[in-house]
Amino acid sequence: MKVIKEISAIQEISDYYKCIGKKVALVPTMGFLHAGHTSLMLKAKDENDIVVVSLFVNPTQFGKGEDFDKYPRDITRDYHICEKAGVDIIFCPETDEMYNKNNCTSVIVSDISDKLEGKFRPGHFSGVATIVTKLLNAVKPVKLYLGQKDAQQNVIIKKMISDLNMETRLVVCKTMREDNGLAMSSRNTFLSESEKNKASVLKYILDEGKRLILEENIADPDLIIKKVNGIIKERTPEFELQYYAITDNEVLDPIKDLTKYKGEVLISLAAKVGTTRLIDNIIFEKS
C-alpha cells in the first residue's frame, strides 16, 4: 500500500495506471474510518483494479461554530483499516497542498445546495463540491464511491459530475448501521452510550414515515411530519429534530401529494443529540 501526500504524485501514478489499462476508483473520506467506509473500499476493490482512499478533513465544508478542530482523527488506525481492506493507495495531503494561499476558486451547485442541510449549514456544499472536484482532478478515477447516508451530498455531486461533463461515475452504496439502526458516522464517537441507544429513534421515525406513505396511504406530508415530531417529543424530548423532509431524490423538491407521486422518495432528517448533530435518510420507490 502506497501513501501519497502530493497532488502531482497522485496524478502521475493515476496517469500511469490509466495508460496500462487499469481502472482506478476513489473512496473520499475525512478519516476516522468505520465499517461504513470499509464497505465502500471493499465494493470499490471488487469492481476496480486500483483503489485510492483519500484521508482529508476538508476545512472549507465546516462553517462558523462547527467542529473542524474537534473532528476525530486517528491516522495510524486509518492506515491499518485501509491496509486490511486491500486499499492500494492512500492519498492524505496537507491542507496547504489542497488549498494554497492564493486559492480563490470554489464550486457551487445552485439551488439544490440551499435546501435541507444547506439551510442549516450555508456554504457547506460549496466546500464539499470544491474538494470533490479537486480530488477527482487529482485522482482521475473511473468511479467514485459514496455512502447513502449523505443523500443530499450525493444528489449534488451527481449533478456536478453531469453538468461539468466529468468522466467519473458516481456509485452510491447503502448506509451501514449499528445494531440498533443508528447510521454509522465518525461523529458517533461524540455520543454517550445512553445517547447512542436513544438515537435509534431516528431510524424508527424514518421507517415510520415510509410505512405511513406506503401502507397508510397518507397524502399530506405535513401530517406525517406532525406524527414523527410527536414520537420524538414522547420518546426523546431532549433531542432537537431540526428537520424531517419528504422530497424527491433528484432535485429535492418537497412532495406535496404523496398519493399522486410516483418515483423515488427521499425521507431525510437532521437532529441534535446532546451536542452532536446527526443526519440520516431512507430512499424508496413509490409506484
Image (cartoon, grey):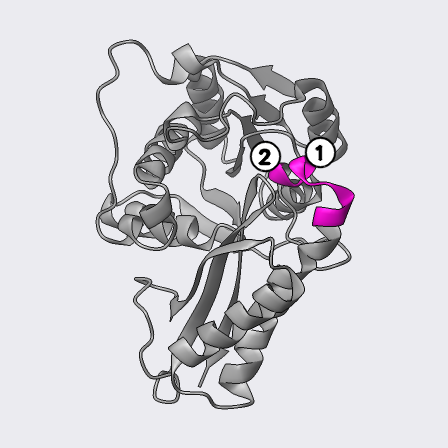
Element assignment for label 1: loop
For the residue pair 173 and 48, the one nearer the viewer reads as 173
Question: Whole-Å distance between the Cαs marked 2 and 1?
Answer: 8 Å
For the residue pair 246 and 48, the one nearer the viewer reads as 246
Height in image: 181 above or below 227?
above
Element assignment for label 2: strand
* Residue 250 placement (x, y as % from top left): 34, 63
Looking at numbered disc 2 in the image, what kind of residue is underneath it?
A: Val
In the image, 127: left or right of 218? left
Whether residue 190 is in magenta: the answer is yes
* Residue on which the image places disc 2: 51
Q: Are marks 2 and 1 in contact (CB under 8 Å)?
A: yes
In the image, 266: left or right of 256? right
Looking at numbered disc 1 in the image, what kind of residue is underneath it?
A: Gly
Q: Which residue is drawn at 44% across and 86% down?
A: 287
Q: Residue at x 51, y 68 (%)?
A: 229
- The numbered mark, 2 or 1, whose residue comes first in the sequence reads 2
What crowding class fits label 1: few (fewer than 14 Cα within 10 Å), some (14-19), or many (20 or more)?
Answer: some
Q: Residue at x 47, y 77 (%)?
A: 224
* Residue 235 placement (x, y as % from top left): 66, 65
In the image, 231: left or right of 217? right
Whether residue 282 is in magenta: the answer is no
The magenta span reads 187-195
* Residue on which the image places disc 1: 86
